[in-house]
Image (cartoon, rainbow, N blue to C red):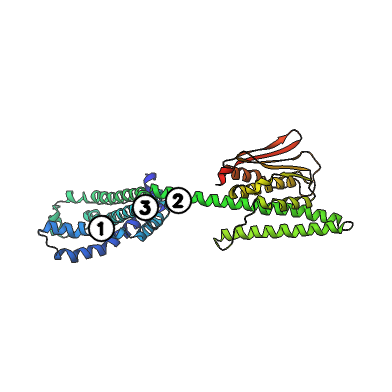
């Protein structure tokens, strides 16, 4: 009993009944249209005319109306708000294919058809049940009782149970119809398999783009801020006795900050979907400036770069630049101003990047900071280019190695 009454107490049944009643009200114009058109059709016989007027023409008209893409949006919103249950997970949207239009049209016809049945019974059954319940205690017209075959008092006492039973049957019908409509709504109004696949692909594309933007921000802006921090500290320490170096450091700070602002402006433009902002295209050809900025920050950098790396495919060159940038950033953040050894060259059909720095060295300015997302970003770049990566402590040094196939950039 509690299980039956709980939906009534919580209002679920009333909301679902409202959903059905709305459907019944929406069917009325179609009935009026059918009543106007049926006499004009060359059909004979009262049965055929009645079927056309009450069933065939209204059902066909509602189905055609349901093919309008916006109907799916409206019906989905209505089902989500009123039906609840399984229908509560619906995401209302317009139909995007003829298959979804057909399902929405079938739902629209079903909704209106079920609604008119429930609405009609909701109007007819309660007055009928009241008459039955009051039969033993009300003096009814004799002709009414004789028409029902209740001339004797014994027959009249069967009225109250019959009236209560009719109300219970109506309630059970409303509950069952509402629950059935709630279960059917996701199939009729939900996305098809093709739409779910398209949505999943769109989400994957958006996620990949967000990850790419996050990597760009982390590698470019993060590196610039790390270098600027060290350069500012170095300039402050030598400002009095080595003003030339201080000016050089301040110039490098300005250049690093300007480059970071350009990268940040580009990323913000992508977030705003502004195609007018060109993408920064730093490649291995710009590696010299990156290495010089790192040296100005006070890092003892031993770099051996094969001149042929400037000829590698553009995609590999761009990613390799960011990978070297992130390796230097990690050294600055986690080890400070320690000697860093960099080897960059071509071996066969692969671009090889090797970097190492001592562990356990005294930490300088900026060491030990960072969120630990740099290596994850590098691994993502390497995975996209189908390369190999290894990073970790080796004896008393931190070693970082990346191998990229040159053909991945073509």
Residue at image mark 2 = 199
Residue at the extreme top: 395
Q: Residue at x 73, y 52 (%)?
A: 226
- Label disc, if present, on residue 189 of the rendered structure: 3
Location of residue 256 in the rendering, given as x and y in whole percent from the top left corner: 72, 57
**Secondary structure found at label 2:** helix
Residue at image mark 1 = 120
Q: Earlier in the sequence, mark 1 or mark 2?
A: 1
Foreground residue, 181 or 127? Answer: 181
Report the Cα–Cα distance between label 2 and label 3. Answer: 16 Å
Q: In this view, does 266 lie to the left or right of 116?
A: right
Instruction: Examine the rendered structure and indicate whether residue 338 appears above or below residue 269.
Output: above
Q: Quick check: marks 3 and 1 in contact, CB under 8 Å?
A: no
Foreground residue, 78 or 187? Answer: 187
Q: Is residue 13 left or right of residue 34?
A: right
Q: Which of marks 3 and 1 is nearer the N terminus?
A: 1
Q: Is residue 282 left or right of residue 100?
A: right
Q: Which of marks 2 and 3 is in front?
A: 2
């Amino acid at each position: 009993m509690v299980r039956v009454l709980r939906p009534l107490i919580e209002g679920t049944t009333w909301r679902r009944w409202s959903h059905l009643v709305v459907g019944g009200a929406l069917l009325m114009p179609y009935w009026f249209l059918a009543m106007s058109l049926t006499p004009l059709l060359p059909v004979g016989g009262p049965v055929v005319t009645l079927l056309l007027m009450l069933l065939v023409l209204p059902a066909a008209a509602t189905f055609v109306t349901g093919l309008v893409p916006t109907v799916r949006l409206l019906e989905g919103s209505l089902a989500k708000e009123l039906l609840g249950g399984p229908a509560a997970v619906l995401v209302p949207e317009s139909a995007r294919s003829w298959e979804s239009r057909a399902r929405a049209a079938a739902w629209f016809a079903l909704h209106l058809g079920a609604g008119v049945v429930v609405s009609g019974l909701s109007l007819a059954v309660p007055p009928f049940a009241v008459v039955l319940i009051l039969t033993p205690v009300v003096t009814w017209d004799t002709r009414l009782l004789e028409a029902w075959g209740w001339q004797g008092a014994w027959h009249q006492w069967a009225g109250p149970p019959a009236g209560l039973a009719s109300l219970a049957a109506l309630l059970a019908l409303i509950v069952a119809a509402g629950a059935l409509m709630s279960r059917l709504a996701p199939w009729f109004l939900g996305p098809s398999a093709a739409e779910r696949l398209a949505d999943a692909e769109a989400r994957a594309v958006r996620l990949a783009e967000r990850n790419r933007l996050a990597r760009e921000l982390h590698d470019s802006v993060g590196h610039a801020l790390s270098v600027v921090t060290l350069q500012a500290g170095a300039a402050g320490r030598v400002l009095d006795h080595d003003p030339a170096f201080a000016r050089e450091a301040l110039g490098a700070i300005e250049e690093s900050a300007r480059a970071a602002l350009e990268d940040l402006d580009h990323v913000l433009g992508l977030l705003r979907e502004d195609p007018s902002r060109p993408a920064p295209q730093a490649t291995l050809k710009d590696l010299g400036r990156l290495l010089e900025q790192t040296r100005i920050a006070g890092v003892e950098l031993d770099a051996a770069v094969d001149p042929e790396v400037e000829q590698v495919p553009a995609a590999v060159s761009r990613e390799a630049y960011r990978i070297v940038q992130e390796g230097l950033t990690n050294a600055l953040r986690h080890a400070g101003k320690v000697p860093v050894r960099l080897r960059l060259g071509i071996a066969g059909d692969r671009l090889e990047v090797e970097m190492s720095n001592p562990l356990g060295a005294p930490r300088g300015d900026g060491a030990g900071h960072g969120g630990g997302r740099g290596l994850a970003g590098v691994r993502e770049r390497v995975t996209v280019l189908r390369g190999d990566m290894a990073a970790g402590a080796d004896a008393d040094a931190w070693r970082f190695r990346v191998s990229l196939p040159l053909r991945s950039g073509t």
